[in-house]
Image (cartoon, rainbow, N blue to C red):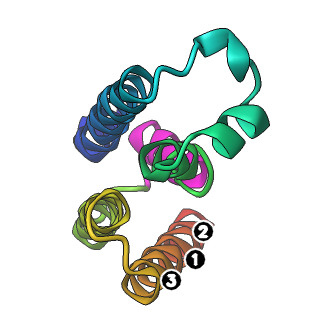
Amino acid sequence: MAHPEFLYPVVALVALTFIVMFAMLKERIAEMTARRIHPQSAPSSSQLSAVLKNTKGADNYKNLFELPTLFYVLCIILMFNTKALSPVLLGLAWGYVALRSWHSFVHMGYNKVMHRFKIFLASGLLLFAMWALAIWQLT
């Protein structure tokens, strides 16, 4: 592995995903227990969304498997490429993890949509910049 330092932001984002997963499960089990919802009464995600009142955790968990997949791919490319040594790219990677963490905090917390949107947009633009810089450096 040429640049293992790119593994650390990946591990941090994976850790965030697990934290959100456990928070989602806690939220879901608490609501289903309190409202006496039998798990079999909503066997699919669409049925569960119709039954549950609080789906913030599940929605955020799904978000962490969308755009972050491009982050994971890029970090893997950067880890194994000898031309990829760039403190700027590493800083951007940590910035992306920070923004995604902030997005999860807002989404699962007070959930103000415009705050969430601005953070999402910033993280998307940052990821785009990472890809553009990486392509420029690697070609």
Asked which secondary structure carries label 1, the reply is helix
Q: Amino acid at mark 2?
A: Ile
Residue 134 rendering spot, x and y as whole percentages: 51, 67
Residue under the point 47% across and 75% down: 120
Examine the image and state in which quarter residue 31 appears: top left
Query: Which numbered tag is attached to residue 88?
Result: none
Distance from Cα at disc 2 to Cα at disc 1 = 5 Å
Distance from Cα at disc 1 to Cα at disc 3 = 16 Å
Q: Are marks 1 and 3 in contact (CB under 8 Å)?
A: no
**To which residue does mark 1 refer?**
132
41 displayed left or right of 22: right
Q: Is residue 60 magenta?
A: no
Image height check: is 22 above or below 111?
A: above
Region rendered in magenta:
69-83
For disc 3, the neighbor class at 10 Å (few under 14, some 14 to 19, many from 20) is: few
Q: Amino acid at mark 1?
A: Ala
Tag in front: 3 or 2: 3
Asked which secondary structure carries label 3, the reply is helix
Residue under the point 42% across and 45% down: 57
**To which residue does mark 2 refer?**
135
Tag in front: 1 or 3: 3
Residue 94 rendering spot, x and y as whole percentages: 24, 61
Q: Is residue 74 magenta?
A: yes
Asked which secondary structure carries label 2, the reply is helix
User: Observer-nearest residue: 71 or 123?
Assistant: 123
The N terminus appears in which quarter of the rendering?
top left
Marked residue nearer the N-terminal end (1 or 3): 3
**To which residue does mark 3 refer?**
121
Residue 86 rendering spot, x and y as whole percentages: 30, 65
Q: Are marks 2 and 1 in contact (CB under 8 Å)?
A: yes
Examine the image and state in which quarter residue 65 appears: top right
